[in-house]
Amino acid sequence: MTTDNNSEPTVVAIDGPAGSGKSSVSRAVARVLGFGYLDTGAAYRALAWLVNGSGIDREDVDAVEGILPTFDYTIGLDPDVVVVTVNGEDVTDAIRQPEISASVSAVARVPHVREHLNTLFRSIVADTYVPGVVIEGRDITTVVVPDAPVRILLTADEAVRAARRSLELSDTAVRVTAEATGDQIRARDAADSQVVDFMNAAEGVVTIDSTSLNFDETVEAVINVIRAATEKEQA
Ligand SMILES: Nc1ncnc2c1ncn2[C@@H]1O[C@H](COP(=O)(O)OP(=O)(O)OP(=O)(O)O)[C@@H](O)[C@H]1O
Ligand SMILES: Nc1ccn([C@@H]2O[C@H](COP(=O)(O)O)[C@@H](O)[C@H]2O)c(=O)n1
């Protein structure tokens, strides 16, 4: 892929439901293209971690908004090493714990939180020196960078997402059935869908359904969309 060193980074926006492969596929795509990778869900998770640790009631919108000025957040863009810190503390692993997955949607539904984090995401992308950035989440194609040259909705059937996620979890000390994982995915998607639509592609957004694709085929499908869009832009 040709890129101009003096130009803005090529922004690849990817949305999708829980377990659709956004983070793993985006990281792989970023590696292949030499792009940065920005996981926006990590910021919502990190804020939920701070809220939980502060003893704040996460349903208390004023209290959640009130903690934002003390939320000093950093995340790296290197797809090989994603390190997340809050107020200088490394929370990379802590934000992946089940209690954070179960509580993050409450924090993410606060409008002021979303505005605050969206401003942060845009400034991280603007300040980067890499040729491109793959940025993934729930409202990237519609709210964060709706004018991105490449916008993709990555999806897969719910049962397939649950099976993939439960396979991943069964590799760890936590043994979770596909059924229990399916319930968690459904609950989080239902809560998150009340705030943003990531189940239906907005106008101009390309849907990639990986239900019957393996991981490498999905990465290839995303790269093909990026190549087609950037070649069209350069023509
Ligand atoms: N096409 C695919 N074929 C097989 N496995 C896949 C495919 N795409 C993703 N996976 C696997 O599915 C699991 C879930 O993917 P991933 O964590 O990237 O999803 P996600 O959309 O980022 O989820 P969340 O929103 O919950 O963070 C991972 O184990 C990943 O390797
Ligand atoms: N653009 C986004 C990204 C994430 N969220 C919220 O964060 C949660 C965790 O996201 P993961 O991608 O790590 O699963 C997610 O369930 C949403 O509540 C968001 O609102 N917008």
Image (cartoon, grey):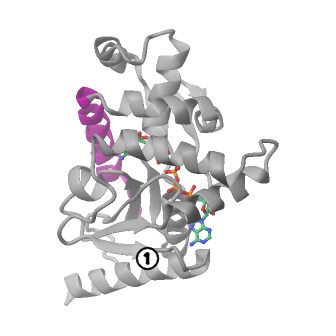
Residue 145 drawn above or below residue 85: below
The quarter in which the N terminus is drawn is bottom left
Name the residue at 45% across, 66% down: 35
**Which of the pair 82/126 is nearer the observer?**
82
Residue 124 among those drawn in magenta: yes
Residue 82 among those drawn in magenta: no
Q: Residue furthest right?
A: 173
Residue 100 coordinates in the image, percent (x, y): 55, 31
Residue segment shown in magenta = 111-130
Query: Residue beneath label 1, please?
Result: 222
Name the residue at 27% across, 65% down: 201
Mark 1 Cβ inside 8 Å of ligand 1: no
Name the residue at 49% across, 34% down: 45
Q: Is residue 139 left or right of residue 43?
A: left
Which is the main secondary structure of the residues drawn in magenta? helix
Q: What is the three-letter code of the residue carrying label 1?
A: Val
Q: State which quadrant residue 180 falls in.
A: top right
Residue 105 visible in rendering: yes
Residue 184 coordinates in the image, percent (x, y): 55, 43
Residue 102 drawn above or below residue 75: above
